[in-house]
Image (spheres, grey):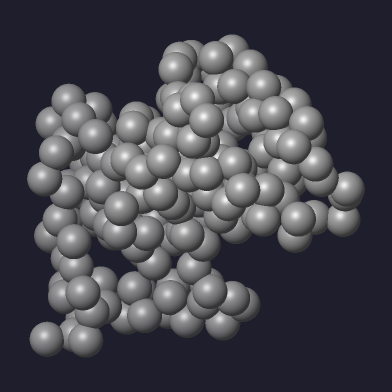
Amino acid sequence: LWDMETVCVKDFRNVMEEFAACSPQLVLLDISLPFYDGYHWCRMIRTVSKVPVIFISSASDNMNIVMAMNMGADDFIPKPFDQSVLMAKINAMLRRTYDFGAAVGMICHRGAVLNTGDGSLSYEGEKIELTKNEYRILLGLMQSKGKIVSREKLMEQLWESDEFIDDNTLTVNIGRLRKKLEAAGLHDFITTKHGVGYLIE
């Protein structure tokens, strides 16, 4: 009707998985949701994305509006609302946001979210800083999750950097990346298939 595709969350325990899967250009949130409230998910979204977030809620007293904005919301529309007002706000928000560039993509696995815009990784609300090489390795593996990625393929991705890359460089970078993942709580995130390559499953 409004020339917009909408995706409704089905699993309210894993909102970030669904968020990453569809990479929305705008998010509508209520405060009252199953398992975790809208504030929690707004905060989680803000750790990985600058996507516009609009709260729509009947709990529209000043305290809740201020709380929503402090959590990272861009606007708050009280219920009941007029549909034409909602659409006007959505269109204005999209116009302002995407005049400046395309939406950032995200890849999600086991609760970890890789942001292809700034090359960062987030897990349970914490940001894990990655070097360019670590990001390229993780991107290659997460884009092919469930499939073995050969060392040669990963080397090709690393050759895009300005650094000299050899087989040992790949081994060192994989080792450093694993340590960062382990420290963040992502245990056994990358599996070695000896003589073949690496796998995220």
Residue occupying image coordinates x 43% and y 51%? 143
Dividing the image into 4 quarters, which one contains the N terminus?
bottom left
Look at the picture and state if 80 lies above or below 108.
Answer: below
List x then y, in percent, for residue 94: 43, 75
Dividing the image into 4 quarters, which one contains the C terminus?
top left
> Would residue 14 be seen by someone viewing this image from the given angle?
yes
Look at the picture and state if 6 lies above or below 100.
Answer: above
Residue 159 lies in quadrant = bottom right
Taking 2 as reference, is 20 left or right?
A: right
List x then y, in percent, for residue 175: 67, 22
Q: Nearer the viewer, residue 57 or 9?
A: 9
Taking 34 as reference, is 165 left or right?
A: right
Tag count in the figure? 0
List x then y, in percent, for residue 179: 63, 17
Residue 145 lies in quadrant = top left
Q: Residue furthest front?
A: 195
Residue occupying image coordinates x 32% and y 80%? 88
Residue occupying image coordinates x 53% and y 74%? 102
Residue occupying image coordinates x 59% and y 76%? 101
Q: Nearer the viewer, residue 66 or 123?
A: 123
List x then y, in percent, for residue 72: 49, 45
Q: Nearer the viewer, residue 161 or 10?
A: 161
Residue 28 lies in quadrant = bottom left
> Would residue 48 be seen by someone viewing this image from the given angle?
no
